[in-house]
Image (spheres, rainbow, N blue to C red):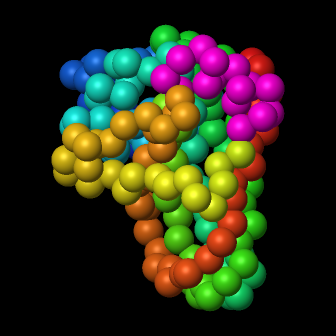
Amino acid sequence: MNRLLLAAITVTFAVMATTTWAFEPNVNDEQELAVARAILDIKKADPGIQRFFDDSTAYAVFPSVGKGGIGIGGAHGKGLVIAGDKVIGRTTLTQVTVGLQLGGQVYAEFIFFKDEAALGNFQRGNYEMGAQASAVAATAGASADANYDKGVAIFTHAGGGLMAEATVGGQKFTYEAK
């Protein structure tokens, strides 16, 4: 297991050496390394997403959100908030859904904050993504037509699993400054 982790870290840093990073992860922090891998994955799936990394005031990355349900469902993930090249805080995502649903999946979620007002709203705990909000599934070219809505742009990148759903629910977030 340790050899596999060391190999993964080595590969990650080899790729990082040829990739422009918005932040440099702490090699001793598993969460930061997971965020770095999630950023690499979404940029590979949709290179156009780079404009959101470049133009946003800050962004939150949840590298692994687990979601599941049978009738009633939920999702939970932990992430980091990054501004410039620094991690400025830790965050959690919690979601409860009700409706027709069956299965489970894992995905990464990215929330880009257009300006200081949108970031401040999130940091104060006033941000909640309602049922009407939508996230763009990151695939090649998906970010080309995406834009900010009320100061945020949200993307997801599938990690694995299968889930069928027709549900209503929202996501709530917590924020803790670093």
**Where residue 57 sits in the image (x, y, percent)?**
50, 16
In depth, the one of 9 and 35 nearer the eye is 35
Tell me if 146 is positioned left or right of 89 in this view: left
**Where residue 60 sits in the image (x, y, percent)?**
57, 33
Residue 46, magenta (yes or no): no
In depth, the one of 19 and 107 nearer the eye is 107
Determine if residue 26 is in view. Answer: no
**Picture quarter containing residue 13?**
top left
The residue under the point 61% across, 25% down is 118
Relative to 113, say whether 62 is above or below.
below
The residue under the point 60% across, 85% down is 101
Determine if residue 91 is in view. Answer: yes
**Where residue 18 sits in the image (x, y, percent)?**
22, 22
In depth, the one of 86 and 167 nearer the eye is 167
Start-end of magenta stretch = 113-127
Residue 116, magenta (yes or no): yes
**Where residue 63 sits in the image (x, y, percent)?**
53, 46
